[in-house]
Amino acid sequence: MAYNDLRDWIKQLEKAGELKRITVEVDPDLEMAEIADRAAKLGKGTAKAGGPALLFENVKGHPKARVLMNQFGSDRRMKLALETDSLDDIAGRIRELLHPVSPTSLMDKLKMLPKLAEVGSFFPKVISSKDAPCKEVIHRGEDVNLFDLPVLRTWPQDGGRFITLPCVVTRDPKSGKRNVGMYRMQVYDEKTTGMHWQRQKVAAEHMRDRLRAATPDLAGNVDLMALTAGGTTSAASLDTLHATTVTKIRNDRMEVAVAIGTDPATTFAAIVPAPPEVEEYLIAGFLRQKPVELVKAETVDLEVPAHAEYILEGYVQLGELRTEGPFGDHTGFYTMQDDYPVFHITAIIHRKQPIYAATIVGKPPMEDAWMGKAVERIFLPLMQMTLPEIVDVNLPPEGVFHNLMIVSIRKSYAGHARKVMNGIWAMGQAMFTKCIVVVDEDCDVQDVAEVVLRTTNNIDPERDIQFTLGPVDSLDHASRLPNFGSKMGIDATRKWPAEGFTRPWPAMLTMEPTVKARVDALWEKLGIK
């Protein structure tokens, strides 16, 4: 049965022995983050890695507040959050949708009807405001005060306090489709925050579409487009544009809503690399096997999760940027200051005695590592739909997901590994992957020791490493320019004569199966521990 809300989820965490209630007073300024960091790293490198979820019940400066952290911080809890015994089972459900068996008889067609009805039941549904728990308390205008929320500062050099687990809702101005993304938000004052949507994110594209519509004569102006996201040190300021154009931009707003503290499937759906045409609310419904209930917001024309703990409503003014950062990021380094859009809040609505959900990112492994691994497993079928030769993929947490991808393939022709590298770099958010290592299908990509052995033995560096230029993650502090740099692919597959390799390729060492079986039977008697 799907969790209705964050409170249902917390009850399940406690029932499963996965929740620790913290009753001593803890400061949301650094202290809470340090506790969560230590908890996340408990059992590091073992099968029981990841400490408990933490519910802080005595928050300094916020006597009525409660804060939930590390809710996804282990393999056990990630499965519990998505109500599955195996993340690969969810991937199997996706595979069935992508590759249904063609019906060959009337009976086969009839058998498909329940599956089609099941998919139809996952679409979100809008309920009335009186039935929406998120609207129990409503603050508008002068009553809006972000400082009432126990927002965390997580690292010493952070530019301020950051909302770190928000579900940010925007609408495509062309298609009308909603998008739910997760972008950190630096709190500037009682009514404004930064909106860290990087230029390659869907919400940034929504803003660019608004700019194109407001200024069709400048639709192709690169500097104008740069007024939507970071890496804008060379962007033109509004002062250099024609006065009429400036007026058009400054008179146009993009409505935004932010949900904090949703059920786990909805929070997780906000980070998945879904195609832009697929709404995250639908993905959440698919994951939880039950539609997400939405409600119309109070001051913006958007639908928001009806059972969220907090909803922030407001707008982003086109063309308005403000310095955001630094921020201690999931790379293990600080993301430096840059200019990003400003979110102006027109209303804060919330449940009675709301629970604030937060996370901390930093040197892995942390909570986001388990979320990233879940994305890896669940969305492997989508990669295989484009590149069917892919057998498996590993995004090691230490590679912070966009820095290293290990891929095993069924190699069928010369240069196949390079074809796969280029295919990955052309695939959505995978375009940011800094290093790709391709191995043969008999290599277990989840066994990093095996991958290192294969890679270092199988490559001639000059022959088997290729470099390319292209877009890189905005968080990459080593690239030659913001958002643009080089990427590396390593072909660690066996080399074929068709690839110019004419020497014999040796077999890997393996013991005879019969010998292994005999030693297995003897092992207990040998007393070797």
Image: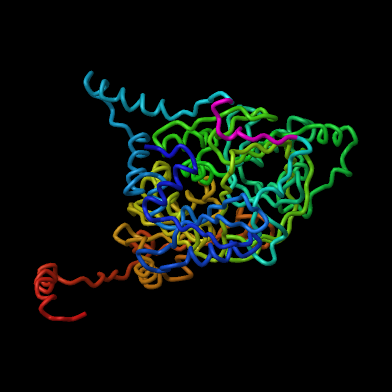
Image height of 148 relative to 61, above or below: above
Image height of 517 relative to 126, above or below: below
Furthest-right residue in this view: 243
Q: Residue at x 41, y 52 (%)?
A: 14
Q: Is residue 508 left or right of residue 360?
A: left
Count of marks, rendered view: 0
Front residue of 454/1: it is 1
- Image spot of residue 102 (x, y percent): 28, 28
Residue 135 colored in magenta in the image: yes
Q: Quadrant of residue 394?
A: bottom left
Residue 188 colored in magenta in the image: no
The image quadrant where one finds the C terminus is: bottom left
Q: Quadrant of residue 95?
A: top left
- Image spot of residue 196 (x, y percent): 67, 49
- Image spot of residue 471 (x, y percent): 61, 52
Q: Residue at x 31, y 22 (%)?
A: 113
Q: Is residue 384 left or right of residue 155?
A: left
Residue 368 in view, yes or no = no
- Which span of residues is magenta-colored? 130-140
